[in-house]
Image: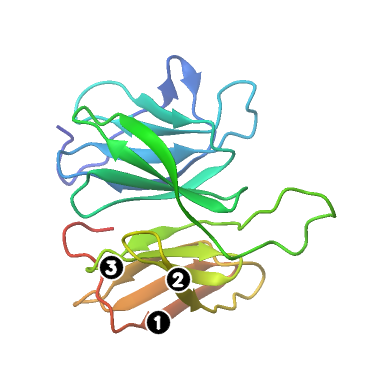
Amino acid sequence: MWPAGKEAILATNYQGKPFGRPNDIVADRNGGLYFTDIPADRTIIPAAVYYVPPSGDPIRVAEGITTPNGLQLSHDEKTLYVNDTAGIDIYAFDVQPDGRLANRRVFATYVARDQTLPAGAPPRSNADGLVTDGDGRLYSLTESGIEVLSPTGQHLGVIPLWCITRRCQNLGFGGPDKRTLYVAGGGTLLRIPMLARGFQGRAK
């Protein structure tokens, strides 16, 4: 297990190849954690999702997503959700007992589209940070703002945002009762009072 209250290096490479740019992270109740890595040079190591078990070396659990970014576990930790910044979909995977992933599928398609792309370029939502509330709804930062999805993948709506220099990048529920949604990025830090309450089962 990792030392409590102390800084520790958990992993620096996968099979001898250094990670490029570890991005988002979520820990499971067993003491393992998932993270996304978006390397600048994909000839060295591909963009991928990794799992670091409580003891042992990191495992590459998903690849083939163009730009894996925000990720989140379902409340029961049977499903892992992963955003693709360079696409328009959020993916779902079944979590296996050893932390590996199976049954990749499109969980939902975002409504956001980046309007600055040149004609003929593949559409992208710029999906980034991803969190869940106590009722299992997912909140994802996209080009449109915060898109809200039901636990079954139904699109429920968009909370519009405005960040100073560029789109916002990450978000999280906080405060003493987790009824505040904090949003950061683009030179901006926002605080949004919510009727929904963040999931109490873990920090993120």
Q: Which residue occupies 49% across, 70% down? A: 146
The spot of residue 35 in percent (x, y) is 39, 40
Q: Residue at x 78, y 56 (%)?
A: 117
Asked if the residue at tag 3 contacts the one at tag 2, i.e. Cβ–Cβ closer than 8 Å, the answer is no
Decide which of tag 2 and tag 1 comes sooner along the chain. Answer: 2
**Alpha-carbon distance for marks 2 and 1?**
8 Å
Name which residue type carries label 3.
Asp
Q: Position of residue 99 (x, y in %)?
A: 25, 31
Secondary structure state at the residue bearing disc 1? strand
Determine crowd level at label 3: few under 14, some 14-19, many 20+ residues with C-alpha closer than 10 A.
many
Which of the two labelled residues, at mark 2 and mark 3, occupies the earlier sequence position?
3
Helix, strand or loop at disc 3? loop
Other-residue count near label 1 (Cα within 10 Å), few / some / many at <14 / 14–19 / ≥20 = few
Rounded to the nearest whole Å, what is the CA distance between mark 2 and mark 3?
15 Å
Amino acid type, label 2: Val
53 relative to 147 in the view: left or right? left
Residue 129 is situated, as x and y percent measured from the top left of the image, at 45, 58
Q: Nearer the viewer, residue 166 or 66?
A: 66
Q: For numbered disc 2, what is the local secondary structure?
A: strand
Q: CA distance from mark 3 to mark 1?
A: 14 Å
Residue 192: assigned label: 1
Estimate the x, y position of residue 175 in percent, counting from the top left.
25, 76
Which residue, given by chain and number where applicable, does mark 2 sit on? Answer: 183
Is the C-beta separation of discs 2 and 1 under 8 Å? yes
Q: Check residue 133 in the rendering and tell me which mark sits there, or answer none.
A: 3
In this picture, residue 8 sits left or right of residue 17: left
The nearer-to-camera label among 2 and 3 is: 3
For image coordinates 31% across by 47% down, the residue present is 26
Task: Look at label 1 and name its amino acid.
Answer: Ile
